[in-house]
Amino acid sequence: MPKKLLLEKLNKQMFACAQCALRKTCHQVVPGEGYAKAKIMFIGEGPGKKEDELGRPFVGSAGKFLDEMLAIIKLKRENIYIANVVKCRPPENRDPLPQEAVTCWPWLLEQIKIIQPKLIVTLGRHSMERFLPNHKISQMHGTLVIKTIPEIGKQNFYTLYHPAAALYNGSMRETLIQDFKKIPKVLKKIEREK
């Protein structure tokens, strides 16, 4: 079955999910979107207010900044895939609770298995911690880590601060842009070594 159809089927299953309390408090499930054969998959922590309203990831202020950074490296949303650790908005935009992330984990793993990205870019601490626990984002941002995850095998991870961090902390903006600009070189390095 083509990857696009596999993702559509998976999305339908996610829409029907009510395994955690987040589904009761959000408007809708936000599974993710983008190119089913994307080389790069961006993973954030969870939908915000605007994402919950529209059913699409990264469409609020942080999403606009993400779009700006994608344009800097000449990438379009239709060439990447964007998802979140949790698929439903936590109330008041609070951080996802560990149990909520655990409940959504199989959905995210299945997305990764279908897409098979060459590079996973984690956006923010919560996303990074799902794959690279016991690390500090202040030390990991802008670095490539190759790690074997039992369910998906060997994978390339590149850690960034969350785009929202730059909205609240102006000095973070330049750091994020500089880290983001390295993505094409990181991808070339991965493709050379495969």
Image: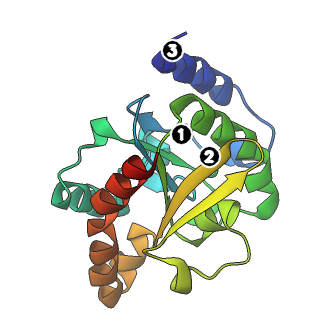
Q: Distance between the residues labelled 3 and 2?
A: 22 Å
At numbered mark 1, what does the secondary structure look like: helix, strand or loop?
loop
Mark 3 sits on what residue? 5
Location of residue 96 in the rendering, given as x and y in whole percent from the top left corner = 68, 62
Give the class, few, some or many, for how many residues have Cα within 10 Å of label 3's Cα (few <14, many ≥20).
few
Q: Distance between the residues labelled 1 and 3?
A: 17 Å
- Which quadrant is the N terminus positioned in? top right
Mark 2 sits on what residue? 88
Location of residue 116 in the rendering, given as x and y in whole percent from the top left corner = 53, 36
- Residue sitting at 38 percent across and 82 percent down? 168
Q: Of label 1 and label 2, which has the lower sequence position? A: 1
Amino acid type for the residue under numbered disc 3? Leu
* Residue 30 numbered tag: 1
Amino acid type for the residue under numbered disc 2? Cys
Q: Which of 64 and 22 is in front in this view?
A: 64
- Residue sitting at 52 percent across and 86 percent down? 138
